[in-house]
Image: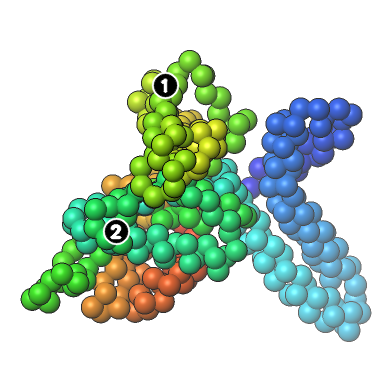
Amino acid sequence: MFEKLEKVKSRYHEISDLLAVEGITNDQNEFRKLSKEYSGLEDIVNAYNNYLRIRKEVDDNRQLLFETNDTEMKDLARAEQEILELKLEDVEKEIKELLIPKDPVDDKNAILEIRSGTGGEEAALFAADLYRMYTRYFETKRWKMELIEFNESSTPGGIKEVVLEVSGKSIYGDLKYESGVHRVQRVPKTEANGRVHTSAASVAVFPEAEDFDLEINENDLKIDVFRSGGAGGQNVNKVETAIRITHLPTNTVVQCQDERSQIKNKMKAMKVLRSRLYEVELEKRDQELITQRKKMVKSGDRSDKIRTYNFPQNRLTDHRIGLTLYNLSDVMEGDLDEIIDKLKTADRAEKLADTETV
């Protein structure tokens, strides 16, 4: 561990020197990368320096115990030694937690997609409920939300698909645990016999990719413009403002028709496309990271049934960590903090166990 800490400290000072080089701000992409890396190492270096200071105090105090013959002084030194060793133990624990491999994209904004799944009309209504739940949660966190795509279903009040951009502090680090299949069990309003039906909706969360994260070749894109459907006034419906972008090498298709401006729709669509392709690049670049995300806290695999919402029993179950709560009504109003905190704690514990076995 200490060899790794020395390397971290060395890199920290190396970046500090690079940031002090005249003209470094001329390359904004490089400047932002270095600044972000520097900020990520700062807490570890400060904790390590604190550890070295306390360890020196422990060694000095131990030397005093060895050298002095004064009984009163020995008693004071022993009492001080106990306090210092406890402090040293606490700092060691802090350092171990700080050294847990951090998902490099946790600090990014996120693209969140909700789609109705199996269950017909009830699935579309549940997708709308999830959309409302998340927007309430974003409001309580004071995160900024921007609608990119919104497709209503044929069911009144239902949603076929919705795509959102969520921005704020460490958004992806919290929302990534929401990716997966969300299952609902409840009695539909149209059910005359009171039978409980099961349906589902899927949630996908991607880190929002910035320009320097991924380069897209314009020649790899097929861009189609068409008239928007749905409400929005004459301009939306009569002018070709909607955009569909196809990334030909991967056959990834993104469309946006939320804005009245074709340019704004294209910008939004490119943002979603970049984030989807960035997720694919992350999988290729760091398979170990993706493997971790698919363990107990399966944050990235949309094929996993991650959570069940049982309305008759007011019960929510997160299947990844065996969490059961009987406050579903509060959760549907956006009270997600307890769930996300417990998922993050379980993820941290798993990663800490992995680092200790290495």
| Residue at image mark 1 | 222
Question: As drawn, which residue projects farthest toward the top?
Answer: 219
**Amino acid type of the residue that numbered disc 1 sits on in the rendered structure:** Lys
Q: Measured from the top left, where is residue 62 in percent x and y?
A: 81, 66
Residue under the image location 43 percent in, 24 percent down: 223
Label 2 – label 1 distance at C-alpha: 31 Å
Instruction: Kindly identify the amino acid type of the residue bearing the numbered disc 2.
Output: Gly
**Image point (82%, 39%), residue name:** 16
Q: Residue furthest bottom?
A: 72
- N-terminal of the pair, mark 2 or mark 1, is 2
Query: Residue 74: where, in percent of width, then height?
Result: 85, 78
Question: Circle 2 sits in a helix, a strand or a loop, which is it?
Answer: loop
Of 228 and 358, the residue lying toward us? 228
Tell me whether circle 2 and circle 1 mark residues in contact (CB < 8 Å): no
Residue 152: x percent and y percent?
A: 32, 52
Q: Nearer the viewer, residue 39 or 89?
A: 39
